Image (cartoon, grey):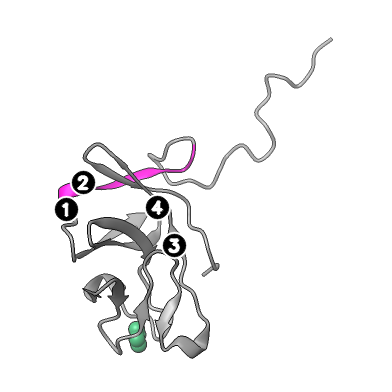
């Protein structure tokens, strides 16, 4: 008697971008592309992402500032934070938490980062949606 063992599971087409592995990780840059203290714009499928190298540690955040939509990758790394180029809203790159102004309680989406040899890969967005 036939069963469904060979059928793909329902919803098998994960919404990962082309080129991503089975866990959704996609190589977006080479390690040398993002020196310490710099930001670099990449894309996770259609989602703009900023890679931030803060003290040698890589982070990935949504690239659109929650305030008025500036491109965070055009901002700066200051101390251990990512600073927006327009009005200096400041984000914790690890958690996405908005540090300044703190009172908003806002948090920008983040992406897990994996370094495989020379490649930097990021996984599916986590944190607050859009
Ligand atoms: S647009 Fe980023 S602080 Fe205003």
Label 3 residue SS: strand
Q: Which mark is residue 33?
A: 1
**Pointer 4 residue:** 45
Count how many numbered circles sit on residues in the image.
4
Q: CA distance from mark 4 to mark 2?
A: 17 Å
Label 2 residue SS: strand
Q: As displayed, is residue 7 above or below residue 103?
A: above
Q: As displayed, is residue 17 above or below residue 72?
A: above
Does mark 1 have its CB less than 8 Å from ligand 1? no
**Quarter-wise, where is residue 51 in the image?**
bottom left
Position of residue 120 in the picture relative to residue 127 (left or right) = left
Q: Nearer the viewer, mark 4 or mark 2?
A: 2
In the image as oriented, which residue stretches furthest toward the right? 1
Q: Is residue 48 magenta?
A: no
Position of residue 89 in the picture relative to residue 12 (left or right) = left
Q: Residues within 10 Å of mark 4 (few under 14, many from 20)?
A: some
Position of residue 25 in the picture relative to residue 117 (left or right) = right
Report the magenta residues as a range.
23-32
Label 4 residue SS: loop
**Pointer 3 residue:** 110
Residue 92 pos. (x, y %): 38, 72
């Amino acid at each position: 008697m036939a069963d469904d063992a060979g059928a793909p599971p329902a919803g098998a087409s994960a919404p990962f971008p082309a080129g991503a592995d089975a866990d959704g990780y996609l190589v977006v840059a080479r390690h040398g592309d993002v020196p310490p203290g710099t930001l670099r714009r990449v894309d996770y499928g259609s989602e703009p992402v900023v890679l931030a190298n803060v003290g040698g540690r890589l982070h990935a955040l949504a690239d659109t500032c929650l305030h008025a939509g500036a491109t965070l990758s055009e901002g700066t790394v200051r101390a251990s934070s990512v600073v927006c180029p327009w009005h200096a809203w400041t984000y914790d790159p690890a958690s996405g938490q908005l540090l300044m102004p703190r009172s908003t309680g806002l948090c920008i989406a983040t992406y897990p980062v994996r370094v495989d040899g020379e490649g930097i890969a990021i996984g599916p967005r986590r944190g607050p949606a859009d």
